[in-house]
Amino acid sequence: MFCLSELEDTVRVPPDLLKLPLEVAIKKVLQKLFLDKVLSIGLCVSIYDIKSAEGGFVLPGDGAPTYKVVFIIVVFRPFVGEVIAARFKESDSNGLRLTLGFFEDIYVPAPLIPRPNRCEPDPCNRNQMRWVWIFEEQEYIIDDSYQINFRVENISYPPVPTERAEDGAIDDDGLGPVSWWEGCSERNNEDDDT
Amino acid sequence: MIVKANAGTVTNFEVLDLLNSKGASKDTTRVMGLKDKVSSSEYKVYDYLMETAASTQTRESVTKFSDKCKDFKLVKAEILNIINLRPSSDVELTPIIEKPDEREIDTEGILELVQQLLPPLPTLESEQEETENAEQEETAV
């Protein structure tokens, strides 16, 4: 889910940061530039390390040194098939939207919600629809009271690198609100014994 | 600009460890608004990770687990996913592993190993202690 990527960039270190040790100053500039941004490699989470910083030339007409920096960055890049724990954000008739706190564009479209299901107006929130999974005549409501496990089905990067969306599936055993599956292991063990 | 898009994958635990070593666990600075070393987006990641299994894991438990997992014919990504999610029952493990029956994977054995080596998910009571433990292990990833 998280991985390291090596990047190279030309960084201008503004004069007010020059009183700091060079590495700290460069890290600050990089943080401002990259953190919380989506590149083609994923969502940048944290600067891991600076491998090298070369140059330090002051370009004509500029009041600050420019460095060529090679650094390693931690990115959030899920792979298709990965199972991730998320929280419920909102739901409507098109499906669910889940959140990780730092990443909120996870959509579970209606066809990937376990079937048979039913979509009904949420009695607690007039602006929302809620999804109910019907299994063995029991009703399981999808709401924000539990952590929700989903599997990554599809990742899409929009052409302009700012936001990113992800499609998730919860229509399999073990996916969906964790409360659905609590107690399942005990039931399995009982079967084994008999 | 991108030299190497994939220079290795890291577990949730390692990211949490990195953020801890930057001082993310010292909550007072966050309240005071001294977001010098840790940015607000990093705090969001930190908050998410503290709710996952990563917050109770230690370096030893994770390394030992991934070593032992080699006997199970699992793909690297699957091991990573197991460490991040810490499945405690069969039904939680099945979506992580692709076609476990065809590949003859011993899911029972994996679950036993998880039970043995990876500490259970954080509950609200134990969270405080674990933060302190994690702080002491400020080693580079």
Image (cartoon, coloured by chain):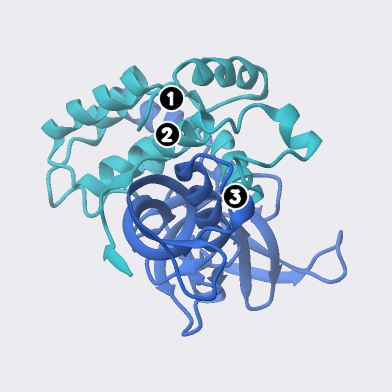
Chain colours: A blue, B cyan
A95 left or right of A22 in image: right
Q: Looking at the rendering, which quadrant does residue A130 occupy?
A: bottom right
Amino acid type, label 3: Leu
Q: Return the residue at label 2.
A: B13
Which circle marks residue A17 in the picture?
Answer: 3
Which circle marks residue B57 in the picture?
Answer: 1
Amino acid type, label 2: Phe
For label 1, the crowd category at 10 Å Cα-Cα, with few meaning under 14, some 14 to 19 and many 20 or more, is: many
Q: Secondary structure at mark 2?
A: helix
The answer to whether residue B86 of the structure is visible from this angle is: no
Which circle marks residue A152 in the picture?
Answer: none
Q: Name the residue nearer the viewer: B66 or A110.
A: B66
Q: Looking at the rendering, which quadrant does residue B113 occupy?
A: top left
How far apart marks 2 and 3 lie (CA) works out to 32 Å
The answer to the question of whether label 2 and label 1 lie on touching residues, with beta carbons closer than 8 A, is yes
| Number of marks in the rendered image | 3
**Given the current orientation, which residue lies at the most extreme front position?**
A60
Could you tell me which chain the residue with mark 3 belongs to?
A: A
Q: Secondary structure at mark 3?
A: helix
Q: Position of residue B108 (x, y in %)?
A: 25, 30
For label 2, the crowd category at 10 Å Cα-Cα, with few meaning under 14, some 14 to 19 and many 20 or more, is: many
Q: Position of residue B31 (x, y in %)?
A: 79, 35
